[in-house]
Image: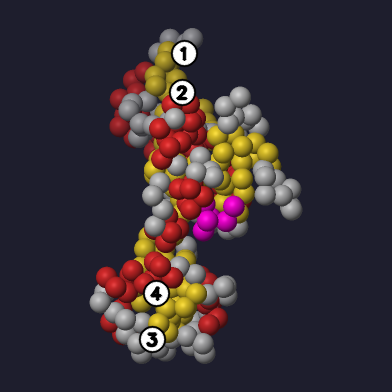
Amino acid sequence: MNKLVLGLPKGSLQDATFDMMGKAGFDVRVGSRSYVPSIDDPELDGRLIRAQEISRYVELGMLDAGMTGYDWIVENGSDVVQVAELIYAKQGLRPVRWVVAVPEDSSIKSPADLAGKRIATEAVGLTKRYLASKGVTADVEFSWGATEVKAPELVDAIVELTETGSSLRANKLRIVDTVLESTTRLIANKKSWENPWKRAKIEQLALLLQGALAAVSRVLIKLNARAEHVSALTKILPALHAPTISKLDTDGWVAMETVILESVVREIIPELKKAGAEGIIELPLNKVIL
């Protein structure tokens, strides 16, 4: 049987990735001490690996494909196929940022002020390239963890990953500049991508994951209305193309349904009610293939 070896990120992205795989239709399970997750697709052979390492193993061909951050692709300088951008992170559907942060009372106000300073980070290559782009020379050292607590006693500044900024604020740090904005990517080994079966399997995975992500922020709205109210209701209802309208088994009545962003539901339901909608139903979605 054909097999695709897929790298899944261990660590902060693990739970969000398993959840997204589940929404895409793949049940992924792993024991507390295992690095070989089980996937209910006999054509997928999973490996649980730190996100920092996945792009290297994909490039080397030890993995056919993998899900990792764009930041680690850049950090490793990995020559891989970037198949799809998947905008999700540990705490939500948003990009994450690598930022330069310093103590609140630091004299460092701009990238130029980093000249000659000591900077701690897990992304040494990323930080050195950033400093070079700014024409700044500084001492960059690798941080094994707990980077936020190292300034100001051990280092002058840090370059750290942040999603909301709450951890930086809790450690009385302020952001000076953004080094890189990153999102999760589905990547493929170049030789695997040239294999027709593997490419088709990777593209299937990309389609389903993107559909699951699109569905997270959308819902299905269904309602009934008198035919004379359809024009007014259509103007209120956003849709991918246009609302679906079908006749009911009652003269003069129709059913309408459409997919909309969940964020606008609370605004438009009162408007729909005023415009003549009845029996309004909101339903969650598993996938939306755009």
Q: Amino acid at mark 1?
A: Leu
**Which residue is at the front of the view, 15 or 58?**
58
Question: In the rendering, at what x and y percent does residue 73 appear?
Answer: 42, 55
Label 3 vs 2, first from the N-terminus: 3
Q: Is residue 145 above or below residue 190?
A: below
Of the two numbered discs 3 and 2 in the rendering, the one whose residue sits closer to the viewer = 3
Calculate the distance from the C-alpha at mark 4 to the C-alpha at mark 1: 60 Å
Residue bearing mark 4: 100
Q: Which residues are magenta?
A: 49-54
Give yes or no for contact between labels 1 and 2 (Cβ–Cβ under 8 Å).
yes
Quarter of the figure with the C terminus: top left
Quarter of the image for residue 266 reads top left
Q: Amino acid at mark 2?
A: Asn
**Which residue is at the front of the view, 22 or 251?**
22
**Which residue is located at x 57 percent, y 38 percent?**
5
**Which residue is located at x 52 percent, y 75 percent?**
143
Question: In the rendering, at what x and y percent does residue 3 appear?
Answer: 58, 31
**Which residue is at the front of the view, 241 or 129?**
129
Residue bearing mark 3: 117
Q: Can residue 261 be seen here?
A: no
**Which residue is located at x 40 percent, y 82 percent?**
139
SS label for mark 3:
loop
Q: Is 50 colored magenta in this rendering?
A: yes
Within-10-Å neighbours for mark 1: few <14, some 14–19, many 20+: some
